[in-house]
Amino acid sequence: MKAKTDLQELAVLGGLPAFSEPLHVGRPNIGNKERLLQRIGDIIDRRWLTNAGPCVLELEENIARFIGVKHCIAMCNGTVALEIAIRAAEFTGEVIVPSYTFIATAHALQWQRVTPVFCDLDPATHNIDPAMIEQMITPRTTGVIGVHVWGRPCDIGAIDDICRRRNLSVIYDAAHAFGCSYKGTMIGGFGLAEVFSFHATKFFNTFEGGAVVTNNDSLAEKMRLMRNFGFAGPDDVIHVGTNGKMSEVSAAMGLTGLESLEEFVAVNRRNYDAYLSQLRNVPGLSLIRFDDREKCNYQYIVVEVDAERAGLSRDEIVQVLQAENILARKYFWPGCHSMEPYRSLFPHSHLMLPKCKAVAELVFLAPTGTAVNLDAINAVTCVLRLAITHARDIRRALVNARVPEGRATEKC
């Protein structure tokens, strides 16, 4: 990697990329490799690969204890976990969700013929705006799904109050929020249930996996049945279900990751502080802040672009970074309501979501995690400073590099 100091070194102007290999937003955190391989060896020796093996049971117990809840139901992935939680909560008709979230939040409802009703966000938090929720309630509304975007908890108090008054159920999509807290209480114990993703891109992962956590005994029992085809015994199916089980190998990865959780958070916090310091005086770029009074995993480096001050749009900045092999990403652009099938089902929904559209056009994510060191962050921020210092030259280069309309080249 190279920290660039001269405009002509930028890749969009013909220079070599700052990174010879792609620098991703998030590469998997592994933990202690030897300990992981030992666990996998034990699994192979036992020949117990799935179906509530000892590693899954230990992981569920450890997660429940870490969060401070009664039940953890491990699943094969976060989307299936969300689908099972939705079905167990008996959501029907319409459920209010933010549009500014990963598409799985909406799909998990639509997949089960429950209509997602998209609600606008609070620009200060990027989370669902409780003041807008009541405007979206209809006689068909049965629940709300709140999403803790970037791991910053949404306004749980306000959402719970609305749902109590309006006799609605609420669950929380906590895909970003493992290890985070709300008013001193760990995320996981709010609403009917909360759903985590342990996908490889998350700071805590199980290769591929997820979990639902809850303090509701009957809901937990129902979800345990549902994740295993409804089996209550070897030949006793007592509930409709699917295959949502987590494998033993995935659980082994989770157990290993839990042992290194503090290290992962410490590295994320170090990286966050480095970005914050180095971008502090760069015009038009601002990092979203995390509340130091709360526990946080610092999983994401989220940058908002003020195009007027920066002289470049968010998309232009992302283009500059990607030319350097810095694979910055636009999240969650353009919003669920602008994706199919929702764009066709609700063609006028954008009229109710102006803040979502505005935020989606501002945000990009920068690389972080244990695979990203301080030298890499310095190289990334040097590119950003150069690009914005010479915004006019960069914009001219980007315009000249575009293929004129009607003259697109064919792929070979």
Image (cartoon, rainbow, N blue to C red):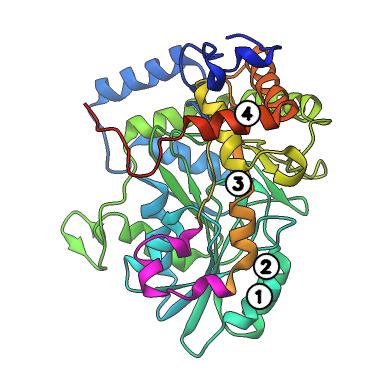
Taking 400 as reference, is 90 above or below it? below
Q: Which residue is mark 3?
A: 177
Q: What is the C-alpha distance between the residues marked 4 and 3?
A: 37 Å
Q: Is residue 301 magenta?
A: no
> Farthest bottom residue?
139
Q: What is the C-alpha distance between the residues marked 2 and 4?
A: 37 Å
Can residue 22 be seen in this snapshot? yes
Circle 3 residues within 10 Å: few <14, some 14–19, many ≥20:
many
Circle 1 residues within 10 Å: few <14, some 14–19, many ≥20:
some
Residue 387 left/right relative to 339: right
Q: Looking at the image, is mark 1 or mark 3 nearer the viewer? A: 1
Percent x, y for residue 129?
Answer: 67, 67
Q: Which residue is mark 2?
A: 129
Name which residue type carries label 4.
Ile
Percent x, y for residue 312?
Answer: 66, 38
First of labels 2, 4 by sequence position: 2
Percent x, y for residue 130?
Answer: 68, 71
Check residue 328 in the rendering and tell me which mark sits there, or answer none: none
First of labels 4, 1 by sequence position: 1
Q: Which secondary structure, mark 4?
A: helix
Q: Is residue 339 magenta?
A: yes
Magenta extent: 335-351
Q: Looking at the image, is mark 4 or mark 1 nearer the viewer? A: 4
Q: Are marks 4 and 3 in contact (CB under 8 Å)?
A: no
Q: Which secondary structure, mark 2?
A: loop
Check residue 132 in the rendering and tell me which mark sits there, or answer none: 1
Q: Which secondary structure, mark 3?
A: loop
Q: Are marks 2 and 1 in contact (CB under 8 Å)?
A: yes
Q: What is the C-alpha distance between the residues marked 4 and 1?
A: 40 Å
Residue 384 location, quadrant:
top right
